[in-house]
Image: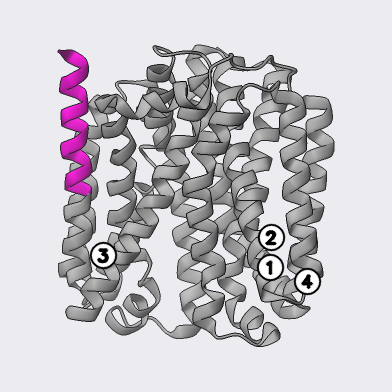
Amino acid sequence: MVLTKKQTILAFTLTLLTFVMGTSEFVIVGLLSEVAQDLNVSVAAAGTLVSGFAIAYAVGTPLLTGWVSRFPKYPLMLVLIGIFILGNVVSALTSSFNVLLAARIFTAVASGVLTALAMTIASVTMPAAKRSSVIALIFAGFTFANVLGVPLGTFIGQLGSWHLTFWVTAALGLVAFIISLFVLPKLKASGASSLKQQLVLFKDPKILIAFFIPTFSIAGTYAIYTYIAPILEGELGIASRSVGLVLLVYGIFSIASNFLAGKIASSKGIGHLRYAFIVQAFIIASLFVTMGFTVAGLISIMLMAITLYMMNATIQVYLMDRAEAYSSGARDLASSLTPVSVNVGITLGSALGGLVVANGSLPYLALVGGACALIASALSFISYNMDKS
């Protein structure tokens, strides 16, 4: 089945939204030194602009999504995009670290809810045969942000100032707002279910198990990726000036992961993920051996990128469908869980990687990452068997 012109434009608009939000979220990583110097704080303190965003996203997104699901989605989306734009404008104007951190927190929660609503809109407006592929495409907006938005935003910030980068993200948000005015469907509210009624989802063991599948898969990758620069330079012998190019290629390979996600979700979903995570575990663990060889190590890293987001669409569709068994209003909350799970996985992987680096050597990151992927596989087997019984 082919998407209609209207559906295609809607899919593009929702992907543009995730691209803009992803750029705003991740670009600060490339500008931490400039922000720290300009605002007279340490780089470690500036790092809270990253961790603060992730924590606000993980905690605030499901709570606020559950609460706002009672409102019609068209005006709600426009208001949230407006808050996102305002957060970036405040970030561009401020010379106060505390104000910048507060703006980042508000932007994080607005971005999280927008992502959840985008998934819900795609789920109810796209043909069943294309639903998984469109959801994977929307997730790909974050990947495109890493590949294109972050390097461009970093370049702008280093060429001019980091304030200018936030002006650019605000302008991109305005473009998304204008397009959304004409493209977003005027859907009714999901249903009159309270936040308390929606939070009952977390009593469902199938929901909880599905939530932690992406967490451990992403943690497996980020145990490595958090320390990718020292791995490339210290273990693979890549020159410092070439690290950016390698990361660009890594980002390009990770785009393929989103299309792989659509294929998996369109077939047997979690059934296929059971074995896909075993492959991911093998690829990540192979770095323990290949980390001492430039070409072989790079091959392992690029294959790792291809498996990065392969579970997103499957888990997203599974959680939304599972939530329908409770109420239509719970679908919005369920839509927020996969992005939250990914953020939890990034935090977990970074923390585990930090423990390994502090107490061992870089090659052992590969074993820890591989173990996380095996846990994701085990959870997939449990989920699959629970659904069959």
Q: How many marks?
A: 4
Q: What is the distance, in whole Å, between disc 3 and disc 4 at their CAs? A: 34 Å
Callout 3 secondary element: helix
Mark 4 vs mark 2: which is more N-terminal?
4
The residue carrying mark 4 is 94
- Magenta residue check for 387: yes
Q: Amino acid at mark 3?
A: Leu
In which quadrant of the rendered view does residue 119 lie? Answer: top right
**Residue 149 in view:** no
Mark 3 vs mark 1: which is more N-terminal?
1
Question: Is 134 in front, or is 351?
Answer: 351
**Residue 341 in view:** yes
Q: What is the distance, in whole Å, between disc 4 and disc 1 at their CAs? A: 7 Å
Marks 4 & 2, CB-CB < 8 Å contact: yes
Q: Which disc, if any, is residue 103?
A: 2
Q: Amino acid at mark 4?
A: Thr
**Image coordinates for residue 161, horizontal then vertical, percent:** 76, 77
The residue segment tinted magenta is 373-389
Q: Nearer the viewer, mark 3 or mark 4?
A: 4
The residue carrying mark 1 is 100
Marks 2 & 1, CB-CB < 8 Å contact: yes
Q: Which disc, if any, is residue 352?
A: 3
Q: Name the residue located 44 percent from the left edge and 60 percent from the top edge.
A: 250
Marks 4 & 1, CB-CB < 8 Å contact: yes
Q: What is the distance, in whole Å, between disc 3 and disc 1 at their CAs? A: 28 Å
Q: What is the distance, in whole Å, between disc 4 and disc 2 at their CAs? A: 9 Å
